Image: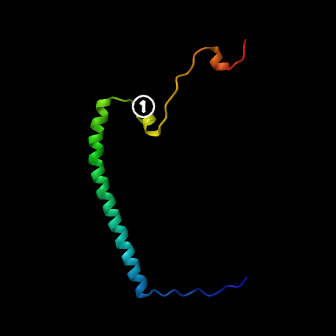
Amino acid sequence: MLRRKPTRLELKLDDIEEFESIRKDLESRKKQREDAEVAAAGEEAAAGIVLSTEHKSREQLINDRIGYKPQPKAAGRAAHFGTFEF
């Protein structure tokens, strides 16, 4: 197997400027996201007060959030074995 010499990479001024601009953009986005999370935390606290007045169980809250509406189970032997007769 032939071994080639390492490729030389040159760092140019344009590359540094592009990196700095992208880094500043990412930092500003992160700061905006953190500010939005702080504001949302205050809203969640207010929503938590409203939810506590409704007194829903944890399971009911999860079911409401995912849109699951549990159906009651039918009682009796036919429910367990389908249409089979014994």
Left or right: residue 83 versus residue 31 is right
Residue 59 versus residue 7: which sits nearer the camera?
59
Quadrant housing the C terminus: top right
**Residue at (27% x, 36% y) in the render:** 49
Q: Residue 20, relative to residue 81: is it above or below? A: below
Residue 53 versus residue 67: which sits nearer the camera?
67
In percent of width and height, residue 73 lies at 55, 21
Left or right: residue 2 versus residue 53 is right
> What's the image's color scheme?
rainbow
Indicate the secondary structure of the residue bearing disc 1: helix
**Residue at (37% x, 77% y) in the render:** 20
Q: Residue 36, relative to residue 54: is it above or below? A: below
Q: Residue 10, relative to residue 85: is it above or below? A: below
Quadrant housing the N terminus: bottom right
**Residue at (38% x, 82% y) in the render:** 17
**Residue at (47% x, 39% y) in the render:** 66
Residue behind mark 1: 60
In percent of width and height, residue 69 lies at 49, 31
Q: Residue 86, relative to residue 34: is it above or below? A: above
**The image quarter in which residue 81 lies:** top right
Left or right: residue 79 versus residue 32 is right
What amino acid is found at the position of numbered circle 1 in the picture?
Gln
What crowding class fits label 1: few (fewer than 14 Cα within 10 Å), some (14-19), or many (20 or more)? Answer: few
In percent of width and height, residue 56 lies at 36, 30
Left or right: residue 70 versus residue 26 is right
Image mark count:
1
In percent of width and height, residue 35 lies at 29, 58
